[in-house]
Image (cartoon, rainbow, N blue to C red):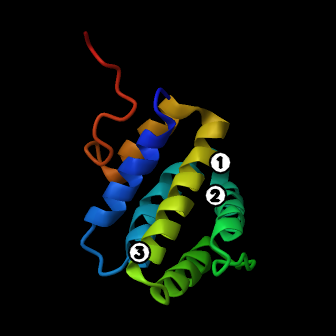
Amino acid sequence: MENPGARRQQIKDLLSSLPAGEPGSALVTLLRPLRLQVASLVSEDGFNFLLERTVFLTGQSFQWINAEPAASAERELDTLRAKLATRTHEDALAASTFLLSSFVDLVASLIGDSLTDGILRAAWGGDALGTLGEDKQT
């Protein structure tokens, strides 16, 4: 990817633009359809592992998001939403952006940017990330 920060900024913009009342709900709103797309490639257990790893990594920068093993991805998402709801909007948005961007970066490191961008478009709709990953015509 030409600009490594482009996807992160677009994810932040997307989280900010969702009508959900708080970033925790917006994060879960974006992770649920992404879960279906990623699990179709790496299995439900694979998705759960990637999510657990991402929560652990996020906890290194946001100590209040500590990694606690969850029985399922759905329970992990509920726990994340609850933790984010206790924070200020700015803190929750920063942590949500970090977590979702880290998750997407982890997926991209496994399957490549092009396929990852395709998964994001399938999960969130074709316009969700603008022109990210599209070839520019000259």
The residues tagged by marks 1 and 2 sit, at their Cα atoms, a distance apart of: 7 Å
Determine contact: label 1, label 3, CB under 8 Å. no
Q: Is 110 rendered above or below residue 57? A: above
Q: Which residue is mark 3?
A: 90
Q: Look at the numbered discs 1 and 2 and tell me whether their residues touch, using CB distance below 8 Å.
A: yes
Q: Amino acid at mark 1?
A: Val
- Residue drawn at point x = 35 percent, y = 52 percent: 124
Q: Is residue 38 left or right of residue 90?
A: right
- Specify few, some or many for label 2: CA neighbours under 10 Å numbering under 14, 14-19, or 20 or more: many
Quadrant in the picture for the C terminus:
top left
Q: Which mark is residue 47?
A: 2
Q: Residue at x 61, y 35 (%)?
A: 111
Which residue has dot 1 on it?
A: 42
Q: Is residue 132 left or right of residue 45?
A: left
Q: Secondary structure at mark 2?
A: helix
Nearer the N terminus, badge 1 or badge 3? Answer: 1
The residue type indicated by label 3 comes to: Glu
Q: Visible in this render: residue 119?
A: no
* Label at residue 123: none
Foreground mark, 2 or 3, reads 3
Q: Please state the horizontal and vertical placement of residue 136, each as a whole percent of the image.
A: 30, 19
Q: What is the quadrant of residue 88 in the picture?
A: bottom left
Q: Nearer the viewer, residue 130 or 94?
A: 94
* x and y, in percent, of residue 45 in the image: 70, 60
Which residue sits furthest bottom? 86
User: x, y percentage for residue 37?
Assistant: 49, 50
